[in-house]
Amino acid sequence: MANITIFGQGTMGKAIASIFTDGGNTVNFVGKETDAELSDIVVLATPYAAAESIIANYKDALKGKILVDISNPVDFSTMDSQVTPADSSAAEEIQKLVPDTTVVKAFNTTFAATLASKKVADSATTTVQIASDDEAAKTRLAELIQAGGLKTIDAGALKRSRELEAFGFLQITLAIREQITWMGGFAAL
Amino acid sequence: MANITIFGQGTMGKAIASIFTDGGNTVNFVGKETDAELSDIVVLATPYAAAESIIANYKDALKGKILVDISNPVDFSTMDSQVTPADSSAAEEIQKLVPDTTVVKAFNTTFAATLASKKVADSATTTVQIASDDEAAKTRLAELIQAGGLKTIDAGALKRSRELEAFGFLQITLAIREQITWMGGFAAL
């Protein structure tokens, strides 16, 4: 059994929490406080714009821990690009801020509704894509997600976050443009 | 009824041809010859590395036509990046070479086997994502693909080729790493 700390209680944070608790694990949420106790696994389920200040507050506390970044750094003012450099990703930028923390990318290619229902469009089991340079961290997170009833894909090194975030960005634009629904999207078959 | 010219008779070229012929259209293939007649719709179903020389040969003939780029410009020597600039895409680079041609991105997020069988992993109908700055060209191609028994998604402007190519690249790496199969992959549900 694991305890997982989640920053952010939006639809994504709540859906991710339910996966972990369904797997028999415990979750504690952190809101605006700046001195909360962190578990060994920490999920940053906040908008990318909030990442920097949270990490500044918790940089020491995050040392040696697994930090799961779920963000899609979309430029929401234009919906036409991402705010991260073209040759990087949110996960890689976050890793630079916390070099002594193991950053894992996950949950950014699955809409909140498909995490909550565990199904994409009421049919295929939702699959969480996971990328990290740390194989053990990736395996540990995959096991927790699978225990919660979802499938996982090992997407490779943290650098693959570039493609995962492009995937997430594309999927958001498709839902906004009503080409797919927020209960659907891309399922790994 | 339309006639479509396809450069390249690999598994992708052949699978795309069968979609068009299943829809009641005719296809002519072009191989190494440098003076073939081109139809109004031309599909570049060759590796990205071959695009530049083909376009150099056919630049005048391509004026006013629709050119469908299906490429995934993966650096196959490393399988860790793409050969195109990080802030561009194969489709955008090709558009720069033929400013008087309407470039449409399509077919790069669907494996050849899922085009040939029209199913992803024998279950969901294969969906072709299409991006272009020309709405009429996008609609025309979508109708031809739908007539051949597949679904289509309007992925937006040609700039979205960046995300479509990241999606295609990711999907190829996942198949190589046996996280998905070449008969499966991501289905739009």
Image (cartoon, coloured by chain):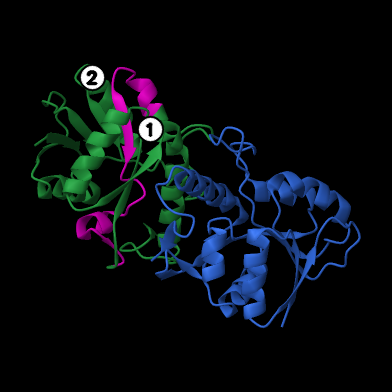
Chain colours: A blue, B green
Q: Is residue A108 above or below residue A136?
A: above
Label 1 secondary element:
helix
Q: Is residue B113 magenta?
A: yes
x, y (%) of residue A66?
Answer: 74, 65
Q: Quadrant of the N terminus of chain B?
A: top left
Q: Which residue lies under the disc numbered 2?
A: B64
Tell me the quarter of the picture where residue A93 sits. top right
Against A85, residue A36 (above or below) is below
Q: Nearer the viewer, residue B68 or B36?
A: B68
Percent x, y for residue A109?
Answer: 53, 56
Viewer-closest of B8 and A88:
A88
From the viewer's perspective, tell me whether residue A152 is left or right of residue B156.
right
Instruction: Report the Cα–Cα distance between label 2 and label 1.
Output: 17 Å
**Chain under callout 2:** B
Q: Is residue B184 left or right of residue B171?
A: left
Q: Which mark is residue B91?
A: 1
Residue A46 shown left or right of residue A64 in the figure: left
Of callouts 2 and 1, which one flags the residue occurring earlier in the amino acid sequence? Answer: 2
Q: Secondary structure at mark 2?
A: loop
Q: Is residue B115 magenta?
A: yes
Whole-percent x, y for residue A89 in the image: 63, 45
Local packing at callout 1 (Cα closer than 10 Å; few below 14, some 14-19, many 20+) is many
Residue drawn at x 23%, y 58% as measured from the top left: B118
Q: Outermost residue, right direction?
A: A35
Query: Which quarter of the rendered picture does the C terminus of chain B lie within?
Result: bottom left
> How many numbered marks are there?
2
Residue found at x 35% / y 36%: B49
- Nearer the observer: mark 2 or 1; the answer is 2
Q: Taking the image as drawn, is residue A110 in sight? A: yes
**Magenta range:** B93-121
Question: Image quadrant of residue A101?
Answer: bottom right
The residue under label 2 is which amino acid type?
Gly
